[in-house]
Image (cartoon, rainbow, N blue to C red):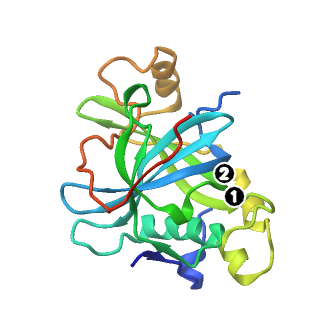
Amino acid sequence: MSFFKAAKSKDDLKQGGGSGHIVSSGCYPVNIIAPFVNVSKNGSTSVDLYVEHEGKKQVVYGNLRITNNDGSDNKIGAKVFNQLVIVSGVEEVSDPVEAELPIGKQEAMEDVGVLEDLSDLDVLMRIQMEYSVYNGNIQEKKVIRGFFRTEDKASAEEIVNEEGYGSQYEKDAAYFDNVTYKDNLDADTITKWIAEGRPKGTAGGSSASATPKPSFGKKKTFGKS
């Protein structure tokens, strides 16, 4: 069966304009060790990415939402995920398989549904940091804004059209450092918050632990040293 089929229309392909840990906005060369599927308690489906950057393995959680609670397509999340599929060279992504990833506390293994077709994939991943407030606490989120092919910085649109490789990357480069501040937050407030070690009671990212772990059949192990 199929989990996702690459879309190649013009609208589907457009992209918006020190430490191995990704903690700031930018465009990063990463190896996607394994993308894994989460289904929320309300029924929406998202894809989280277990990646390696400069020797550091980490998870980018919660913003590639493929479907909404009612099962309809989430246009924003699906569009960015489609970029990843095109950049990978895969025409259609197979259904997830049951697997284990070392993404728990102290790298404890957790059961997840992995998209094998997109595993062990080198890409350039554009991240934009976003800060907001929820229940009085600062929330920090890594928003995936797009993907490019590693070897020539080609966007999904350029790959499909077979021209202009790297042009979109050069245009987007002016915005790689952009940060989104919501709820009256500003750069000074966030700089102070980070310098203080993201004080207890604040959130450093989205959590996947609150969502149920769906079953996908056979089980494999990824990314454990």
- For label 1, the SS is helix
For the residue marked with disc 1, what is the amino acid? Answer: Asp
Label 2 crowd bin: few (<14), some (14–19), many (20+), radius 10 Å: some
Judge by depth and name the residue closer to the eye, 118 or 127: 118
For the residue marked with disc 2, what is the amino acid? Answer: Tyr
Judge by depth and name the residue closer to the eye, 136 or 36: 36
Q: In this view, does 198 lie above or below 20?
A: above
Which residue lies most toward the left here?
Answer: 42
Count of residue discs: 2
In the image: residue 44, left or right of residue 191? left
**Which residue has dot 1 on it?**
172
CA gap between label 1 and label 2 equals 5 Å
Q: Residue 95 falls in which quadrant of the image?
A: bottom left
Q: Residue 2 falls in which quadrant of the image?
A: bottom left
Question: Residue 52's mark?
Answer: none
Residue at image location 40% in from the left, 42% down from the top? 182
Label 1 crowd bin: few (<14), some (14–19), many (20+), radius 10 Å: some
Coordinates of residue 225 in the picture (x, y in percent): 56, 34
Coordinates of residue 24 in the picture (x, y in percent): 59, 36
Q: Residue 41 falls in which quadrant of the image?
A: bottom left
Marks 1 and 2: CB-CB under 8 Å?
yes
Residue at image location 30% in from the left, 29% down from the top? 137
Residue at image location 39% in from the left, 37% down from the top? 109
Coordinates of residue 136 in the picture (x, y in percent): 26, 29
Q: In this view, does 124 lie above or below 138?
A: below
Residue at image location 59% in from the left, 32% down from the top? 21
- For label 2, the SS is helix
**Which residue has dot 2 on it?**
175
In the image: residue 116, left or right of residue 139? right
